[in-house]
Image (cartoon, grey):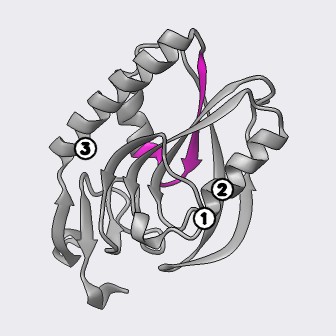
Amino acid sequence: MSIRENIKEVLISEEQIRNRCKELGEEITRDYGEAGVTPLVIGLLRGSVPFLSELIKYIDLDLQYDFMDVTSYEGTKSTGDIKILKDLDTSVVGKHILIVEDIVDTGRTLTAVVDLFKKREAADVKIVSLLNKPSRRVMRIEPDYNGFDIEDYFVVGYGLDFNQHYRGLPYVGILNDDQY
């Protein structure tokens, strides 16, 4: 059986994602270019990897990037307990940080990461997210650059997973209820 059979509905197509990445890349290029700064792009593993890979194709700047593995989820629920599984290899002191995230849900993870980078003396911290789920927010945080607002669906694909499955789908889909 194909994993695609477990998808109730394709919410955001591969083409929509690619087009939005192009728009976001142009916006980020303009904003950082006008400010005359080079962003240090931080991908939050693992979900952000496909988004980061597509997005940086359209950022016309001499950027640097690094990765951090941070989690607050078990299955479909945010535990509120933030764990750093892999820290950065690059210092953020004095750098203009652009965090790349797959989805802003409760905001707990991003709030903790932003606070950490500020404590580590980053010059500034901005967020670009493929998906934004404002109805689930428990922390006061919003992406500076937003791909798509979505309703409170459990979504997978394009880096988003359910227990490490479905990340490789080329689109964002709603998982069948009987799969979780």
Tell me which corner region of the image, top left, top right, bottom left or bottom right, holds residue 27: top left
Question: What residue is disc 1 on?
Answer: 139
Question: Dot 1: few (<14), some (14–19), or many (≥20) neighbours within 10 Å?
Answer: few
- From mark 2 to mark 3, how far is it between C-alphas? 25 Å
Q: Name the residue under label 2.
A: 111
Q: Where residue 97 appears, x then y in whole percent?
A: 64, 31
x 44%, y 38%: residue = 52
Distance from label 3 to label 1 (Cα)? 26 Å
The percent coordinates of residue 81 (x first, y second) are 71, 73
- Is residue 126 covered in magenta? no
Q: Which residue is drawn at 52% across and 53% down?
A: 46
Disc 1 marks a residue whose amino acid type is: Met
Question: Does 10 sit left or right of 180 as displayed?
Answer: left
Q: Which mark is residue 17?
A: 3
Q: Which of marks 1 and 2 is nearer the N terminus?
A: 2
Query: Helix or strand or loop: what does disc 1 sit on?
Result: loop
Q: Which residue is drawn at 20% across and 47% down?
A: 14
Tell me which amino acid carries mark 2: Thr
Instruction: Say if the magenta span includes residue 45.
Output: yes
Q: Is mark 3 on a helix, strand or loop?
A: helix
Q: In this view, does 23 lie above or below 148?
A: above
Q: What stretch is highlighted in magenta?
A: 38-50
| Mark 2, secondary structure of its residue | helix
